[in-house]
Amino acid sequence: MALTTLQETDKTRLDFEVTGDEGVFRPSGVLDEDVNLGVLLPAIQGTNPPLKKLTIDLGHVTRMNSCGIREWILTIDKITSAVPCVFENLNELFVEQATMIPVMFGKQKPRIGSFQLPYHCGNCNLNIQKTLTLADLASEQGPSRIPSYPCPKCAKPLGFDWLEDEYLAFIDSIS
Ligand SMILES: [Zn+2]
């Protein structure tokens, strides 16, 4: 395994990890006007052996602004054309953008390995992230649904802490 940090500032870090012919791209922190996602394409094209798969782990992105989103869209278009990509740990920041921007994960239908869903217990004032796959979100009959879980502290049902309809519309659009 070889880990390269492509960019590191006080608010953003871009890590690229290669094992054999598979890579992982892991952006952390803030994607804004100071992020330099342009370093990723040369990095994935410079691997030996050539990459056969790139996992893009989005679980550590905490904030994006319009400049960062623009840079993201330009980059992801080139990356998804260059190598098969799987997106993991998609959080509500990306789902929110994807409901407005159809090319948020490239021009083709994206492969999404997992989502991070935000839940909240009003009783304990507790925020909980659940990592779920498309299979977890599928129901046996009919459209996808957001599963419900008990609070690990008080056992009352957790509330889904985001826009359920938008999440489900996005999930149905990529399933
Ligand atoms: Zn609780």
Image (cartoon, grey):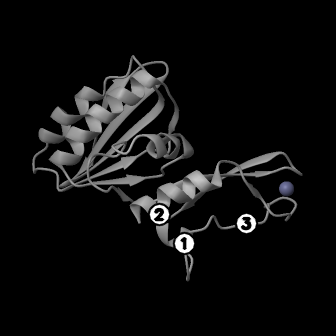
Residue at 48% of width from left, 46% of height from top? 99
Residue 48, x across and y down, in percent: 10, 46
* Position above or below: 144 against 30: below
| Residue labelled with disc 1 | 143
Which residue position is annotated with label 3? 149
Q: Mark 1–mark 2 contact, CB under 8 Å?
A: yes
Give me the residue at 17% from left, 56% from top.
52
Q: Secondary structure at mark 2?
A: helix
Contact? badges 3 and 2 (CB < 8 Å):
no
Nearer-N-terminus badge (3/1):
1
Label 3 vs label 2: CA separation? 21 Å
Q: Amino acid at mark 3?
A: Tyr
The residue carrying pointer 3 sits among few (fewer than 14), some (14 to 19) or many (20 or more) residues within 10 Å by Cα, namely some
User: In which image quadrant can residue 25 be found?
Assistant: top left
> Which label sits in the foreground, 3 or 1?
1
Is residue 113 something that shows in the picture?
no
Give the answer, above or below, for where 151 lies relative to 59. Answer: below
Tag of residue 172: 2
Q: With 170 as the anchor, is 49 left or right in this view?
A: left
Residue 24 pos. (x, y %):
32, 47
- Is residue 110 found left or right of 48 in the rendered image? right
* Mark before the other along the chain sequence, 1 or 2: 1
Q: Judge the density around disc 1: few (<14), some (14-19), many (≥20) Cα neighbours within 10 Å.
A: few
